[in-house]
Image (cartoon, rainbow, N blue to C red):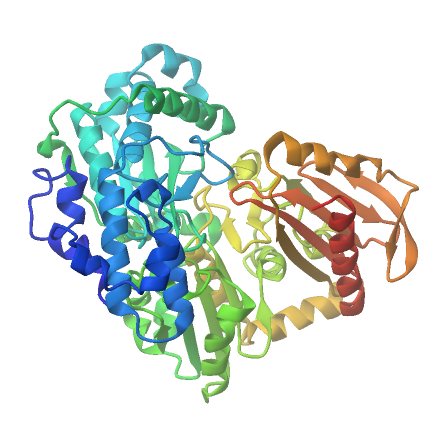
Amino acid sequence: MHYDAVDRNYCDTINLIANLRSGVNILCLKTISAGEKMTIADNLKEKYITTSPRQSNYFAVVHALLAEGADPEKDIDAVYKLIAREIGEETIPPETPVKFGTSGWRGILGKEINCRTVEQVTLAICGIYSSPEDIAALSPLLMVKDPEQARQRGCLIGHDNRFGGETMARRAAGVLSSEGFTVHYAGESSTGVLSAALIELNAAFSINLTPSHNPLDYGGFKFNAADGGPAQPELTEMIGERSREIIARGVVCEKPYREELIHKVDSLDLWRRFVRRNKNKHRLDLDEIMARLAAREDMIVVADSVHGVSRIHLKRLFGPAVARLIHLRDNADVTFGGVAPEPSSANMRQVSETLRQRPEPLKLGLIIDPDADRVRFTDGGREIDMNFFGAMAFHFLHQHKGLMGMAAKNVGTSNFVNRIAAALGEEVAETKVGFKEFKPYLNRALVVYEESDGISIIGHTPEKDSYIGLLLALDMTMSLGKNLSACLADLENQYGAAFPGRGSVETGAAGDKLKKTLAQLEDKTPGATIIVSGEARKIRELITIDGYKIVFSDESWLMIRPSGTEPKVRFYVEGNSAADRDALMAAASETLKELGL
């Protein structure tokens, strides 16, 4: 399928600056005629498409066509041309105001994330870095001394594989150049790679157009300050407030773009330079690991990019060891083949099946989300999500790499690492969801990770990065001479097994209304009970760091919190057996029903 190239192939043939301002010129190869729109099935067109782009639900058509299982290429092309025009031409403010959550601002492509809103949010950021007063007030967060230094150090810009990402990234680049900022243009790249590149370039900040693992309908806007990590709420709240003001006033960029300030950079090369420079801190030698892998005919790696940005990085990253790599879903596809593009058991099946057919005794499989900030592993026998891999990484760095330090995880992550750390005499910090919450622990924690498959390590960036997780998994497997499931089994035998689980429900409630509904959980205080498998289980502790984590007297727990990026309520549990985990999942669901969710 070629619909991912509606803007890409055309952009490659035109001057970078000449068409930056006119998104529609880049996005639309030709005017959409009535005849072309008729290629969309009549029933879908009648149901979802009107004469008003704002009232049309183009992505509902895409989903319906993908669900048919036929070959919908022509129809999907027609729909994406309509989405392209909306991305380039939409001027109506988004219905949902710009707001940065745990990992940036996300919204529907075209209707919320489009050339105009990207331009306006970029203008808001430029305004902050151009104001001596703002820089003085936010100095510890911005890490620049004055507007001139901010302009000279400039901004790193990248995007993932989402439809229209290149066009919107180039629009942001043009706006920044018009305001006098140096622009380091990375093009398509991953969140973790851009974080390292930002630090290596000593740029003032970065803009990354990605909604991470969200469905194909979404676009996103991530902002990182000079330390390479997600910006703190005080800063993102200001960006959101300024953006909403600019959007409400209809402000657009009117200054000419300055081509001489825009420079292309190789972000993956910068990432490799960063990892090599810090190998004495984390003890992961990129070149030595890949050389060892290249020499091992008894090991195979199967990686699934799910059509995301890692498809353009992995072969380069493996270098001399590329012969040991089997790369799945490594072609460009903005629909992700119709699947939810996240590390999940369902998406892992192809990796596991491929590994099971391989003769090599050492096997490593992984699946990576679109912007490559999340990764999940398997060896074909057992799936290993970050609840377990984060704890394994901590033990490996501590016991086999000789590093001393604590671990940090979000409060909804398995307590498996707590047992290991206690036995090793180390502390564990538990935080809210969001990698920005790990910043106080970056120089002390050997690993920082979230159950949602994000990880970073000491000596690396303050941003989650699937590639550093991959290096850890490769080194662990080869150094210990065991597949990951065997490594995990050893730890379980030594420290005791854990049985985490998670789920979510969509809800119409949001904001203060949802918070008020969930506040009913405040009565789940020590001594109270919750029915689990027909029996009353006594509560030992209620933790309200992030949502409501109810810890029972037998060390099992369940947690309920609202999503920071989607209209969902998420729940997490950990039992003392597989059956206990399932019982807690049912109890969490029942609790949500009682709350009316």
Front position in the image: 379 or 189:
189
Q: In the image, is residue 496 above or below residue 422? A: below
Residue 295, horizontal then vertical, whole percent: 36, 78
Q: In the image, is residue 411 above or below residue 296? A: above
**In the drawing, does residue 574 fall left or right of residue 563?**
right
Front position in the image: 64 or 42:
42
Q: Split into 4 quadrants, where in the image is the N terminus?
A: bottom left
Residue 28, horizontal then vertical, whole percent: 16, 49
Whether residue 133 can be seen here: yes
Q: Residue at x 59, y 37 (%)?
A: 510
**In the drawing, does residue 479 fall left or right of residue 116?**
right
Q: In the image, is residue 127 above or below residue 106? A: above
Whether residue 284 can be seen here: no
Front position in the image: 499 or 175:
175
Residue 276, horizontal then vertical, whole percent: 35, 52
Q: Residue at x 50, y 36 (%)?
A: 101
Q: In the image, is residue 214 above or below residue 68? A: above
Q: How many marks?
A: 0
Residue 215, horizontal then vertical, whole percent: 44, 55
Q: Residue at x 74, y 59 (%)?
A: 585
Seen from this angle, which residue lies furthest top? Answer: 133
Quadrant of the rendered image containing residue 154? top left
